[in-house]
Amino acid sequence: MKVLVLGGDGFCGWPCCVNMAQAGHDVVMVDNLSRRKIDVDLGVESLTPIATVHDRLRAWEDMGGRAIRFVHLDIAQDYHLLLELLRSERPEAVVHFAEQRAAPYSMKSSTTKRYTVDNNVNGTHNLLCAIVESGLDIHIVHLGTMGVYGYGSHRGATIPEGYLTVEVPQADGSRFREKILHPTDPGSVYHMTKTLDQLLFYYYNKNDGIRVTDLHQGIVWGTNTDLTDRDPRLVNRFDYDGDYGTVLNRFLMQAAIGYPLTVHGTGGQTRAFIHIRDSVKCVELAIDHPPISGEKVRIYNQMTESHKVKDLAEKVAAVTGAQVSHLPNPRKEAIENDLIVDNRCLIELGLKPTTLEDGLLSEVVDVARRWADRCDRSRIPCVSSWTTTQAAALKAVV
Ligand SMILES: NC(=O)c1ccc[n+]([C@@H]2O[C@H](COP(=O)([O-])OP(=O)(O)OC[C@H]3O[C@@H](n4cnc5c(N)ncnc54)[C@H](O)[C@@H]3O)[C@@H](O)[C@H]2O)c1
């Protein structure tokens, strides 16, 4: 199958590209390399030394991998080039990873808020528009986030896979049942863009019959897959800084360098997680099982387990002997929340969940130890605050 991978140079996209090429797909990687540029702007680097996109692709071919072509293109800005690309490549599927994906980065300033909205919403809308204009029947597999459901209290209810069945009272006292998109409750500008993506998919699916699978992904942990482990030039990125590092990878990296684990607030925040190997597998399953013509947007909860942040810290401390430190929370969010998630769809399609118990925690610690000398400890604290109230609390401890 011909597959375009938008954002294929990123943390989730790169292992996905090689996995699809290995599976025999004809893969075209599209990326504007903005993530690498943001590293330069922020003055940080991936903990793992990542090869340039061209060296990565050469290395993959040197190792006998099926060639992956690279197209340098900004999907949010270069609409006509995107349309031309669809027309010339005629892909059967487009996997869409190409968004600014860090909540703290999105909350840094008015510049990063506006960039995140412009980039993410325009990119998704350009893709939908270009598919309609091309007249091609292309399946979109989009990476959304579990954060669209919100991290407030769900009062013990299980979060369904995208749609909620509601009963609507009528004037005559009767009720009718309907399945609606689950209400959204974004916790950052980044998460808000993902909720807007959802509406765009809903509309273009209804109006133009565009086939979409929206993967509401949990926080991804781990670094490499079996394929990216094969050669140092294939190594995947590892973000550890306060803007782009995600909680579990940050804890594992902090443990590796003897830095107290940075728990924000009480640590009672519950989040959903998935290992990078499972993330790659889920995208493969979504591509292999496309929605049929006329089907409404398919939504899968792409996560394998939920944990409270403080429990994760304790788990990592137990494995590594790390200290835990409690810091003011830079985010405006619930102190505690529940998160019970229905994730049956991907499991029924064949996902075999990798869990924290599978010994992979120490694998990540080993990767972090190997590259510990590349870590800039001054970039570990989270300094991007959600409002001036959180900013003042952060300042008080500096
Ligand atoms: N990493 C996670 O924990 C996580 C969790 C849930 C959802 N997701 C979603 O998965 C997707 C990929 O995340 P990631 O961690 O790989 O992020 P990433 O930043 O590492 O990768 C995104 C890639 O998209 C590219 N890109 C961004 N805007 C673009 C544009 N306008 N045109 C072309 N390319 C563009 C970037 O250069 C980068 O290579 C994102 O949409 C993200 O929201 C990630």
Image (cartoon, helix red, strand yellow):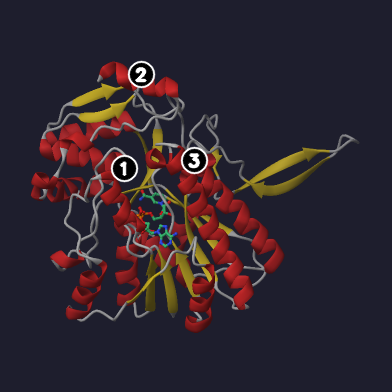
Residue 352 shows in the view: no
Where 336 sits versus 170, above or below?
above
- Quadrant of ligand 1: it is bottom left
First of labels 1, 2 by sequence position:
1
Residue in the picture at 54% in, 72% down = 80
Q: Quadrant location of residue 201?
A: bottom right
Contact, mark 3 vs mark 2 (Cβ under 8 Å): no
Residue in the picture at 55% in, 74% down = 138
Percent x, y of residue 181: 63, 48
Disc 3 residue lies near ligand 1 with CB under 8 A? no
First of labels 3, 2 by sequence position:
3
Q: Quadrant location of residue 280?
A: bottom left
Q: Name the mark nearer the viewer: 3 or 1.
A: 3
Where 223 sits versus 388, above or below?
below
Q: Secondary structure at mark 3?
A: helix
Where 350 sits versus 133, above or below?
above
Contact, mark 3 vs mark 1 (Cβ under 8 Å): no
Real-space Cα separation, disc 3 to disc 2, in angstroms: 21 Å
Residue in the picture at 44% in, 64% down = 74
Residue 246: mark in rendering? 1
Quadrant that contains the C terminus: top left
Residue linked to disc 2:
393
Amino acid type of disc 3? Val
Asked whether, in this view, residue 259 is left or right of residue 121, the answer is left
Residue linked to disc 3:
189
Disc 1 residue lies near ligand 1 with CB under 8 A? yes
- The answer to which of 40 and 340 lies nearer the viewer is 40
Asked whether, in this view, residue 337 is left or right of residue 181, the answer is left
Percent x, y of residue 310: 30, 28
Amino acid type of disc 1? Thr
